[in-house]
Image: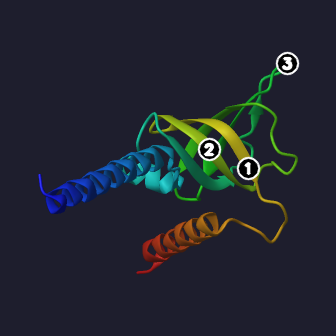
Amino acid sequence: MTPRRRRMLFVAAIVATIGAAAAFALSAFRDNVLFYYTPTQLATEKAPQGRSLRIGGMVSEGSVKRVPGSLDVSFVLTDFSHDLAIKYSGVLPDLFREGQGVIVRGRLLSPTEFHAEEVLAKHDEKYMPPDVAESVRKAHAAKVATKTAQTSP
């Protein structure tokens, strides 16, 4: 084997090794990506069930139900267009309350039920995560447009 051919095989082996390492790294990243959805997106799109994802919205008024003697709580998350039942077992953030913007991380059990592993609440009155604010704004605008179309002659 000539030195030139040996060098080409060596370079090809290095390129193949780097390619395989990059493929493994991208595969690991894809498995760890958390996708963000709103209740409307879950109702209108096919969301991956059994996969970890984040959902943002507002806690519906009168929807928080606690199980006495345990840390289990259930509530309804809404973007004012669609609702999603959330089940959570653990200590809720101090700022968690009805009418509050939250993001939950967990797994979708069914198209209408979600098991949360983590609940995050906004930290002051003026802040809302940009994704949640945008989805709430769009849902509110669509709701107003629908009401206007229904009431106009």
Three-letter code for the amino acid on which mark 3 is drawn = Gly
Residue labelled with disc 3: 69
Number of residues whose C-alpha sits closer than 10 Å to that of mark 2, classed few (under 14), some (14–19) or many (20 or more): many
In the image, residue 69 above or below residue 99: above
Residues at marks 2 and 1, CA–CA distance in whole angstroms: 8 Å
State the image coordinates of residue 86 (x, y, percent, origin top left): 62, 38
Q: Residue at x 23, y 59 (%)?
A: 7
125 lies left or right of 74: right
- Labels 2 & 1 near each other (Cβ < 8 A): yes
27 or 51: nearer the viewer: 27
Residues at marks 3 and 2, CA–CA distance in whole angstroms: 24 Å
- Picture quarter with the C terminus: bottom left
In the image, residue 67 above or below residue 85: above
Dot 2 falls on a residue whose secondary structure is strand
Residue labelled with disc 2: 105
Marks 3 and 1, the one that precedes in the sequence = 3
Three-letter code for the amino acid on which mark 2 is drawn = Arg
Dot 3 falls on a residue whose secondary structure is loop
Q: Which residue is drawn at 80% across and 72% down?
A: 126
Marks 3 and 2, the one that precedes in the sequence = 3
Dot 1 falls on a residue whose secondary structure is strand
Number of residues whose C-alpha sits closer than 10 Å to that of mark 1, classed few (under 14), some (14–19) or many (20 or more): some
- Labels 3 & 1 near each other (Cβ < 8 A): no
Number of residues whose C-alpha sits closer than 10 Å to that of mark 3, classed few (under 14), some (14–19) or many (20 or more): few
Q: Which of the two marks, 3 or 2, is nearer to us in this view?
A: 2
